[in-house]
Image (tube, rainbow, N blue to C red):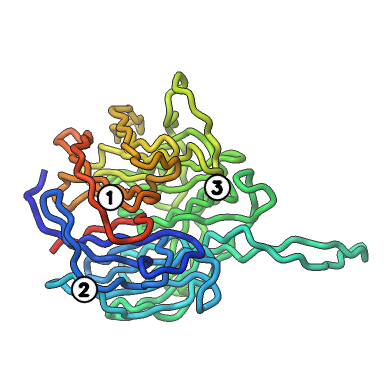
Amino acid sequence: MGQNREAFLYMGSWEHDYSGEELGIQSYRFLDGKIEKAGKPAAAADACVGAMYYDAKRNVLYCVDETESSASGGGRVFAFQVDGETGALTLLSEVSAYGTRTSGLATDESGKYLLVTNHGGKRFVMRSVRGEDGVYRFRREYDETNVVLYALEENGAIGKVKDIVGHSGCGTLNPDIQAHPHCVRRSPLYNLFCVCDKGADAVYMYRIDYGQEKLVLCEGSPYCTGRGSAPRYCVFHPREKLFVINYEGMNRLSVFHYEENGKMEPIFTTDVIPENQEYTFKGGKRGVVSSDLMLHPDGVHLYNITRGLNQIDVYCLNADTGELIHGQTLELPMEKGGIDTIRSFALSPDLKYMLTGAMKEDRVIVLSVDEHGHLSYAGKDAEVEMYHPAPILFVPE
């Protein structure tokens, strides 16, 4: 475990189609399990913050606005310079996401490019279309869902769009709706990018063609994970050719092995909830559903949130075999009885604490992490002056 270090703490408000001064990113200081408001005004104050990403090389925080409607006509992407002394966020750029419900983002290894996923929503328009047989039909059309490649400026500001790759296909999470590329994560080994598409029930692996400044689909992609599975998040092992996926549509965690060319295959699966535990896994409906997923920097301890049950499960990942061994289930107290409350979490820089936002209760739960990666709750809740805290990001001072 590391030494106690003060850190800047950023939390984003997540709520679609809400207008209020509590939205955006709020700034705090964190030391030894205690949260203090930094007194800074909210950044991206009118945004539904779906995800945040920190570029430590340039001290830049990126975030997405996961909305269907904004001044730009859809989702947005922001870049902020982090003040190393005060933690204040200074806007570098705000650009269109070229999609709606913008949900994930990651930079490449060089720091010259940014990838963003647009998840899309449920709204649609009806359009008359004449087929090749001459017959007119009335067709339902949704917003485009895609992965966008931006160039980044020297200071980390978001530059021009270099490529947009559309996703297609639909599963059973939301029947008759389009693809939903939900997250993008970069492999620490080969500069590959994994995209989980919970609408197409598939996992995609991309690489960047730097000569053409284009996204290229890797060999074997997309990998279909089963109808109705809805892969939600992925996390890469920091040193081995492994990544783990959770699902919004079924009670499962999967461990994949991947190669330098991006080809992937599952090598282990396990149930999140034991067979003898009563529950109803409702997929995309409000109920029991996997939410966030995180792998400890040690590459051993894996954490998975299950909304509805409001619990965090801890596993040990065997890097040699890919096996996940369940070690702990921690049920979190919900004061207002919310069933769709726990959405995301983050580890403090000293690895001694985990913070998770009780979104529907407007508070943050502080958990202790021991040397074995296990969690304990000591009632260290923090009331926060913000609406629906969801994504959480630490930046070491």
Spatial distance from mark 1 to mark 3, Cα to Cα?
33 Å
Residue on which the image places disc 2: 88
Indicate which disc, 1 or 2, sits on the residue closer to the N terminus: 2
Amino acid on which disc 1 is placed: Val
Amino acid on which disc 3 is placed: Ala
Q: Nearer the viewer, mark 1 or mark 3?
A: 1
Helix, strand or loop under label 2: loop
Amino acid on which disc 2 is placed: Ala
Specify whether 304 is left or right of 381: right
Spatial distance from mark 3 to mark 2, Cα to Cα?
39 Å
Across and down, in percent, residue 85 comes to: 12, 72
Q: Is residue 248 above or below residue 331?
A: below
Q: Is residue 325 above or below residue 157?
A: above
Residue on which the image places disc 3: 202
Helix, strand or loop under label 3: strand
Q: Nearer the viewer, mark 3 or mark 2?
A: 2
Residue on which the image places disc 1: 364
Across and down, in percent, residue 238 comes to: 27, 48
